[in-house]
Image (tube, grey):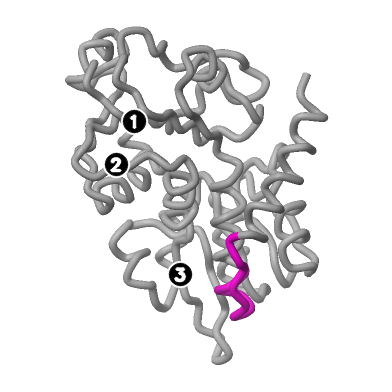
Amino acid sequence: MEYGLIGARLGHSYSKIIHEMLCGYRYDLCPLPTEEEARAFLTKRQFRAINVTIPYKRAVMEYLDELSPLAERMGNVNTITRLPDGRLHGDNTDYFGFQCLVEELGVEVAGKKALVLGATGGAGTTASMVLGDMGAIVVPVGRTSEVNYDNIAQQSDASLLVNCTPAGMFPHCPDAPCTLEGLDALEGVIDIVYNPARTGLMLEAERRGIPCIGGLLMLVAQAAQAVERYTGKATPRERILDVTAVSYTHLRAHET
């Protein structure tokens, strides 16, 4: 395998379609259901570059020879490149992907309260880091957090709500982790779920006239930066948006 994705379960992944649209190389999906299979794969190093998804983003780090400063800071890796001398370099492009989501939504977050649902998970820690770096006041929300799904309406001054949980993901749609009732100051909603293209949370935001965006752009943007790590060729933002639009149409056509 030259390029591809490893993870425990990849049945619903759109990464193959997206990578092949972005760069034209063959991109393989390589499910590795057990940790033993993942270890064997990484030990052989028979790839040029790969992406990594759940549950191996932390586990792969022990097989790497070096990390980018960002991957080291984040404590997890989603992109591995084999260098000319055979060493493995780990990086993280999820940060860039989520940053693109915030920028495309167009909500100014500096100095404003941002509620992050599922803030302690992998995606939640990435979102929290990006928002913190952009100057937001990040408030974690979880089942047992001080701010939880039962009292979230008390955060009526929040400007942004970000869902980093799998709630509402296909086929469990249009479920949502919470309602937007009482969050009257919201200027935007981000749901990193990308399948369905419009989640239950996004549909509620639309009904309330709140700008919202789903996770498909994040998936495409992180893939585009991975392509740059693999090939040295940067993908223009316009191309990222074009591939997202095509992928969105594909998703909508297959929604049930």
Q: Which residue is the site of mark 3?
A: 90
Q: What's the amino acid at mark 2?
A: Val
Residue 70 vs residue 181, the one in the foreground: 181
Residue 12, given in percent of the width and then of the height, sits at 71, 37
| Direction bottom: furthest residue | 85
Of labels 3 and 2, the one closer to you: 2
Please tell me whether residue 116 is drawn above or below residue 96 in the rendered image.
Answer: above
Residue 233, given in percent of the width and then of the height, sits at 62, 78
**Magenta residues, start to end:** 227-237
Q: Secondary structure at mark 2?
A: loop
Of labels 1 and 3, the one closer to you: 1
Label 3 environment density (alpha carbons within 10 Å; few <14, some 14–19, many ≥20):
many
Q: What's the amino acid at mark 1?
A: Leu
Label 2 environment density (alpha carbons within 10 Å; few <14, some 14–19, many ≥20):
many
**Count of number-bearing discs:** 3
Q: Which residue is the site of mark 1?
A: 160
Dividing the picture into quarters, in which one does residue 214 lie? top right
Residue at x 75%, y 34% (from the top left corner): 251
Residue at x 43%, y 42% (from the top left corner): 106
Measured Cα–Cα span from mark 2 to mark 1: 8 Å
Q: Which residue is the site of mark 2?
A: 109
Left or right, residue 109 beside residue 146: right
Q: Is residue 236 magenta?
A: yes
Q: Secondary structure at mark 1?
A: strand
Please tell me whether residue 156 is drawn above or below residue 228 in the rendered image.
Answer: above
Residue 180, given in percent of the width and then of the height, sits at 39, 13
Do callouts 3 and 2 mark residues in contact (Cβ within 8 Å)?
A: no
For the N terminus, the image quarter is bottom right
Measured Cα–Cα span from mark 3 to mark 2: 29 Å
Q: Is residue 54 magenta?
A: no
Residue 169, given in percent of the width and then of the height, sits at 59, 25
Q: What's the amino acid at mark 3?
A: Gly
